Amino acid sequence: MQGYCVKCKAKKDIKGAKQIETKNKRTAVQGTCPDCGTKITVIGGKL
């Protein structure tokens, strides 16, 4: 799964990706950037 890292300003593979549910019941994938460790969230993503 790939997401956009705001700190690196590039698309990166998500490290430690897990599927979550937001407060408004939407699905999302959340993990960290492998280079800088910033949290990456992809709304509507599925594993």
Image (cartoon, rainbow, N blue to C red):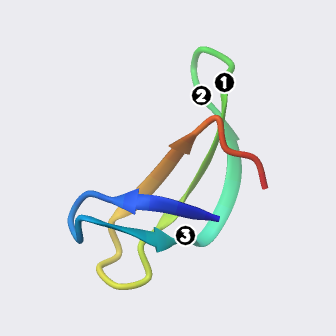
Q: Which residue is found at the position 49% from the left and 59% from the top?
A: 3
Residue underneath mark 1? 26
The quadrant holding residue 37 is: bottom left
**Residue indicated by mark 3:** 14
Query: Extreme right residue here?
Result: 47
Q: Position of residue 17 (x, y in %)?
A: 64, 64
Q: Position of residue 8 (x, y in %)?
A: 23, 71
Q: Which of pointers 3 and 2 lies earlier in the amino acid sequence?
A: 3
What whole-number distance in Å separates the C-alpha atoms at marks 2 and 1?
5 Å
Is residue 6 placed above or below 41 in the rendered structure?
Answer: below
- Residues marked 2 and 1 touching at CB (< 8 Å): yes
Q: Using a 10 Å C-alpha cutoff, classify the residue at mark 3 as few (fewer than 14 neighbours), some (14 to 19) or many (20 or more).
A: many
**Tag in front: 2 or 1:** 1
Q: Is 9 left, or right, of 25 in this rendering?
A: left
Q: Are marks 3 and 2 in contact (CB under 8 Å)?
A: no
Residue type pointed to by label 3: Ile
* Amino acid type, label 2: Thr
Q: Disc 1 or 3, which lies upstream in sequence?
A: 3
Q: Is residue 38 left or right of residue 44?
A: left
Q: Secondary structure at mark 2?
A: loop
Q: Which residue is denoted by mark 2 in the rendering?
A: 22
How far is mark 1 from mark 3, CA to CA? 19 Å
Which amino acid type is shown beneath numbered disc 1?
Answer: Arg
Q: Secondary structure at mark 3?
A: loop
* Residue drawn at the location 29% of the way across and 79% of the way down: 36
Q: CA distance from mark 3 to mark 2?
A: 18 Å
